Image (spheres, helix red, strand yellow):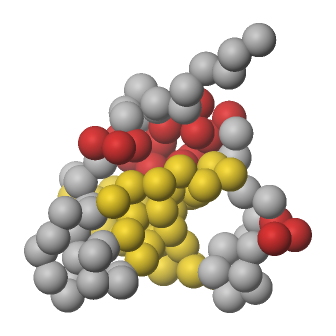
Amino acid sequence: MAHEPIDTLGKATRHNMLVKAECSCGNVRYCRSADLMMVYGGGADPQTLKFDCGRCKPQIKITLLEVHPEHLPKRLMIHKPMKVGGKITWYTERFRG
């Protein structure tokens, strides 16, 4: 039985995945797929989300990561979106699996 590709934030959230946005300059950000789903909707394709880098303006590589709490670094920081007055703002918090 073949597995269905994970091509939406809803599917990634059901698998408890993180979205990793990685810039060619080495800047990396992690976001919970569930947090992104609350902002962009469950049908959004994670590969088409727009991320930018504060250091440069390159093409950003998106990767979905399955969460295994026993294998994650202890100090993993994630970025959470929050809508404030119709505008999306981001803040950083420590990841708790």
Q: Give the tally of numbered discs.
A: 0
Looking at the image, the residue that sits furthest to the left is: 57
Query: Which quarter of the picture shows residue 76?
Result: bottom right
Quarter of the image where the N terminus is located: top right
Q: Residue at x 39, y 55 (%)?
A: 62
The image position of residue 71, as x and y in percent, is 81, 71
Between residues 48 and 79, which one lies in front from this camera angle?
48
- Image coords of residue 4 (percent x, y): 61, 20
Whether 23 is drawn above or below 15: the answer is: below
Q: Quadrant of the C terminus?
A: bottom right
Q: Nearer the viewer, residue 49 or 81?
A: 49
Residue at the far top: name it. Answer: 1
State whether residue 42 appears in this view.
no
Q: Is residue 97 above or below residue 72?
A: above
As drawn, is 91 to the left or to the right of 23? right
> Who's the residue at 61% across and 55% down the image?
65
Which residue extends farthest front?
Answer: 1
Please identify the quarter of the rendering in which residue 55 is found: bottom left
Looking at the image, which residue sits at the far right?
Answer: 70
| Residue 22 shows up from this direction | yes
Where 53 sits versus 16, above or below?
below
Is 43 displayed left or right of 31 in the figure?
Answer: left
- Residue 70, given in percent of the width and then of the height, sits at 87, 69
Residue 54 image position (x, y, % from top left): 21, 83
User: Residue, x 53% and y 51% (percent of image)?
Assistant: 64
Q: Is 75 rendered above or below residue 95?
A: below
Q: Position of 21 compared to 97: left or right? A: left
